[in-house]
Image (spheres, rainbow, N blue to C red):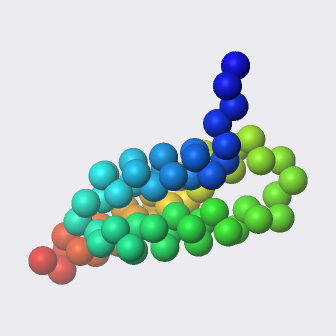
Amino acid sequence: MAQISEAMMIDQVLERLSSTFSDIPPQDVTEVVRTAHARFDSSTVREFVPLLVERRARAELSAKSSLLTWSS
């Protein structure tokens, strides 16, 4: 079975979230994902890092998106 690198999975997370939160500038989505990913730098078990990054970033982006919708 082919292994997908963590970096590739994080890139896929970034693509999904950029598509989902198209109302948020892409550079902001990238920053949220990169910040969430950095929180796990010291984690020794890496298998679930992309999933945890996506959940954390999605929650933050949902909050930002709600604020954008509310202020419009």
Q: Residue at x 41, y 67 (%)?
A: 29
Which of these two is toward me, 42 or 62?
42
User: In the displayed image of the protein, which residue is found farthest to the left?
Assistant: 72
Q: Residue at x 51, y 52 (%)?
A: 11
In this figure, what is the number of numbered marks?
0
Q: In this picture, is 48 found above or below 58?
A: above
Q: Quadrant of the N terminus?
A: top right
Find residue 9 and report its image quarter: top right
Q: Seen in the image, is 69 located left or right of residue 21?
A: left
User: In the displayed image of the protein, which residue is found farthest to the top?
Assistant: 1
Which of these two is toward me, 15 or 53?
15
Q: Residue at x 40, y 51 (%)?
A: 15
Q: Seen in the image, is 69 located left or right of residue 28?
A: left
The picture places residue 20, in percent across and down from the top left corner, at 31, 52
User: In the displayed image of the protein, which residue is found farthest to the front?
Assistant: 2
Q: In this picture, is 34 found above or below 49?
A: below
The picture places residue 43, in percent across and down from the top left corner, at 82, 58
Q: Confirm whether residue 51 shows in the render.
A: yes
Find residue 34 and report its image quarter: bottom right
Q: Confirm whether residue 52 shows in the render.
A: no
Q: Residue at x 39, y 74 (%)?
A: 28
Q: Seen in the image, is 13 located left or right of residue 72?
A: right
Which of these two is toward me, 35 or 72?
35
The picture places residue 12, in percent across and down from the top left corner, at 48, 46
Q: In this picture, is 30 found above or below 48?
A: below
Find residue 25 and report its image quarter: bottom left
Q: Quadrant of the C terminus?
A: bottom left
User: In the displayed image of the protein, which residue is found farthest to the right?
Assistant: 44
